[in-house]
Structures are given as structure tokens and as C-alpha cells.
Amino acid sequence: MLGPTVNLISMAHRLQIRLLTWDMKDTLIKLRRPVGEEYASKARAHGLVVEATALEQAFRQAYTTQSHRFPNYGQSSGLSSRQWWMDMVLHTFHLAGVPDAQAITPIADRLYEDFSSPSTWQVLEGAETTLKGCRKRGLRLAAISNFDRRLEDILVGLGLRDHFEFVLTSEAVGCSKPDSRIFHEALQLACVEPAVAAHVGDSYRCDYQGARAVGMHSFLVEGPEPLDPSVRSSIPKEHILPSLSHLLPALDLLEASNPMS
């Protein structure tokens, strides 16, 4: 009788993850087409021909600059997230060789509306199955995303919103991952301690490190690009998910290898 009794005791003291928080973009959802292609397509519809590759490169540069000057969609500077994005589009086209703001403004309006539409986005392979598997397991799910106010409607349109108890965007909270405040906000909303919560995302800095800094467990989803070797070597291999289908086995291993005190 000793064996089964000991086993029951050890099971009772196993870690049980109660809350699983999710990054959104490039973890569960992604754009149907690259940004450069979307921008080039809308420009053509307005009679402007600009190379998609030039727009893609300009977008990356403009986004870096805009995010540095006006973090988190310009909240602390009195900008609305829509105005932040409008300025982003103008700056992108300017860098791509189209400085005429008057010509770009209607394109920027159209792009903002299109990126608000679920039809511009798609659910990543394995996302729906994995989310259903998590809920069947009894896990509570929530979203933590560096995104603006449009995310809720996008998730509704993609059929994903009902999987989550709540959706926290950086615009709503007033800070972006990896800031600890957005993770703490999620834990407080769920009334869960960080030791029994885990986060899933594709960014080493914002998701993996951000969650672990507040005491949560964390998993890093591999994207289409290979992980930087220095990042890969710094993470236990069981925390790296080659695909979303690897999550539930990784959770089993996490819970089995982390007894609760």
C-alpha cells in the first residue's frame, strides 16, 4: 500500500498551472500578407506605385522611430492610437520616397480600417486546436498583447475571443510588454499567483523574459525565422515550442518536474 499512497501524495503536491496567458500577433494570429504588400496594394488603388520591398523596409524603420518617440501608441503624448498609426503610415511612405502627405492621407485612412478588419488577419496553424485543448484541460486563458484597441474586434471576427476570460492590450493598460505592470494586471484580474501561471509568446524579450521576471512560467514559440543561437542556448529546451502542438506536452513536463512546496 505504501507505493500508491506515496504516489497520491506526490500528485497532490505537483505544480498545477491554473492560468495561461497568450501573446497574440505571430503567436496565435498573423497578417495574411506582409505589411509592405498591404501598403503597396492600397497605394496602387489610389494611383501610386511604390515597391512593396521599399515599403516593408521603410515601415520597419518608421515603426522603430515612432515607438521610440511615442511609446505605446503615443498615450503619454496625448495621441490617439489611430493618429499614431496615421503618422506611422505617412512616415513610412515618406521614407519610401513619397513625401506628399495630402496624397497619402486617404491611403492611411484605408489602411487603418483594413488592419482593423479580421479579413486582414488569419489564425495560425494549430491555434484553435491548442486553445480548445487547453480549455478541455481546465486551464483559464487570457490574452496579453502589445496591441491597440482594435484587437478585441479582430479576435471576435476570427472566432477566438470566446477562448479568453479577458484581453489585455498595452493601449488599455498603459504599458507594453515586457513591463511587469501588464503581467501583474493580468494576474490580479485572474486572482492567480504567478507561480501557477504561464505565458506563451514568440518574443524572447517581451514574452519569455517579461513573464519570468514577475515569477510566471513561460514558453517561447518558434517563428518562421530560426532562433538566435544565443537565445536558444539561454533557454531550457523544454521551454521552446517548435509549434503550438508542442504546448500541452510541455505543460505536462513542466508540472511533473516542478513540485509545489
Image (cartoon, rainbow, N blue to C red):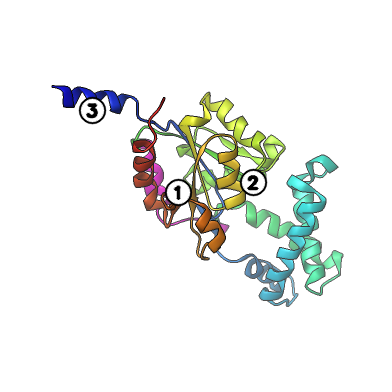
Q: Which stretch appears magenta? A: 120-135
Question: What residue is shown at x 60% (from left), y 35% (from top)?
Answer: 183
Q: Amino acid at mark 3?
A: Asn
Question: What residue is shown at x 64% (from left), y 65% (from top)?
Answer: 35
Q: State the CA–CA distance, disc 2 to disc 3.
A: 42 Å
Q: Amino acid at mark 1?
A: His
Circle 3 — which element?
helix
Residue 70 counted in the magenta span: no
Q: Residue 150 appears at what percent x and percent y?
A: 64, 45
Which one is in front in this view, the residue at disc 2 or the one at disc 1?
1
Return the residue at label 1.
239
Instruction: Point out the tag, 2 or 1, that comes first from the N-terminus.
Output: 2
Question: Relative to residue 207, is residue 43 drawn left or right?
Answer: right
Q: Tell me, yes or no, whether the two marked residues, 2 and 1, touch with CB atoms within 8 Å.
A: no
- The answer to whether residue 146 of the structure is visible from this angle is yes
Q: Residue 92 appears at what percent x and percent y?
A: 77, 65
Residue 121 tag number:
none
Return the residue at label 3.
7
Return the residue at label 2.
146
Instruction: Point out the tag, 3 or 1, that comes first from the N-terminus.
Output: 3
Circle 2 — which element?
loop
